[in-house]
Amino acid sequence: MRPGKHLSSLLFPRARCLCCNDPRHLVAGQSLCPRCRDALLEMKTSHLCCPRCLSFLNQEKACSFCARGGLSGIERAYAPFIYRDEARMLVLRLKFGPFEEAGPPLAMAMAQAITGQGFDFLVPVPLYRDNLRERGFNQAELLARMLQHHRPELPLLLALEKTSKTRRQSSLGHEERFVNARHKYRTVANVSGKKLLLIDDVRTTGATAQDCARALKEANAHSISLLTATVAA
Ligand SMILES: [Zn+2]
Ligand SMILES: [Zn+2]
């Protein structure tokens, strides 16, 4: 390697966009290039979904999911992004690295999604201990800690424990997912009378969140809302 080239690569480390891997258009200090940041804005849920449960409205005025009872036990659901393209890529990077770069854009958008709302605690959805050992960290807890940079007044409470393994949800149908996710969580902290905000990376059917809410409600939590970085279409 020519000495000049070596020196310049030390002075200007070649950063790449986390989503598209493009090194050319990256602005210093950003983990996404401007194109991917714009694309991420297109993944915003706000104009497409029911404000209560985040189901797709598909031109309808009223949400048919909420009309059928909605997410039982969950007061409100918040998610800044739809789980696809750039937003999906960020969630995958959060799990498989580099999470230090993938987390902040998600956490910032999550903080904006709950502006003006009051909660007593952030409660990350836990992983089963074998999965935690395998991965080394819980991505939901990581998001909650990054969220605290924006909402330092919200304390973290590791209120839940996952008591058994869940079969991979992706291999199952809608009804099976609810049976599969039933009674997998228990409360391990005092949540009595508290307004809780569950934190997770992705919401698909909402079965996991509803099972967490059931456990927290049985422990007399005042209310449970849900904040995920993304919601699957
Ligand atoms: Zn990019
Ligand atoms: Zn709804």
Image (cartoon, rainbow, N blue to C red):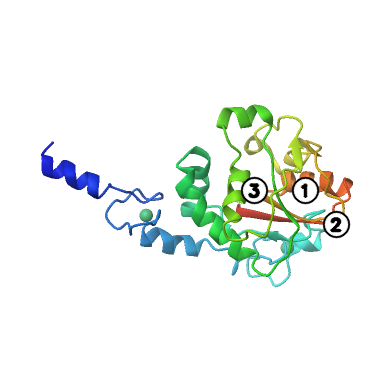
Question: Which residue sits at x=15%, y=44%?
Answer: 5
Residue at x-position 81% and y-position 59%: 68
Q: Which residue is mark 2?
A: 222
Q: Which mark is residue 57?
A: none
- Label 1: element kind: helix
Residue flagged by tag 1: what amino acid is it? Gln
Q: Residue furthest bottom?
A: 61
Disc 2 marks a residue whose amino acid type is: His
Q: Do callouts 3 and 1 mark residues in contact (Cβ within 8 Å)?
A: no
Q: Which residue is mark 3?
A: 200
Image location (x, y in percent) of residue 42: 49, 64
Q: Residues within 10 Å of mark 1 (few under 14, many from 20)?
A: many
Image coords of residue 179 (percent x, y)? 78, 38
Q: Which residue is mark 1?
A: 210
CA separation in Å, label 3 and label 2: 20 Å
- Give the foreground label among 3 and 2: 2
Does the numbered disc 3 mark a residue whose Cβ is under 8 Å from ligand 2? no
Depth-wise, is mark 3 or mark 1 nearer the camera?
3
Report the side of 103 relative to 155 (left or right): left
| Image coords of residue 168 (percent x, y) | 65, 34
Residue at 56 percent of width and 58 percent of height:
81
**Mark 3 or mark 2: which comes first in sequence?**
3
Looking at the image, the residue that sits furthest to the front is 153
Pick whichever, 131 or 153, lies toward us: 153
Secondary structure under badge 3?
Answer: strand
- Asked if disc 3 and disc 2 are in contact, CB closer than 8 Å, the reply is no
What quarter of the picture does the C terminus occupy? Answer: bottom right
Q: Looking at the picture, which amino acid does disc 3 mark?
A: Asp
N-terminal of the pair, mark 2 or mark 1, is 1
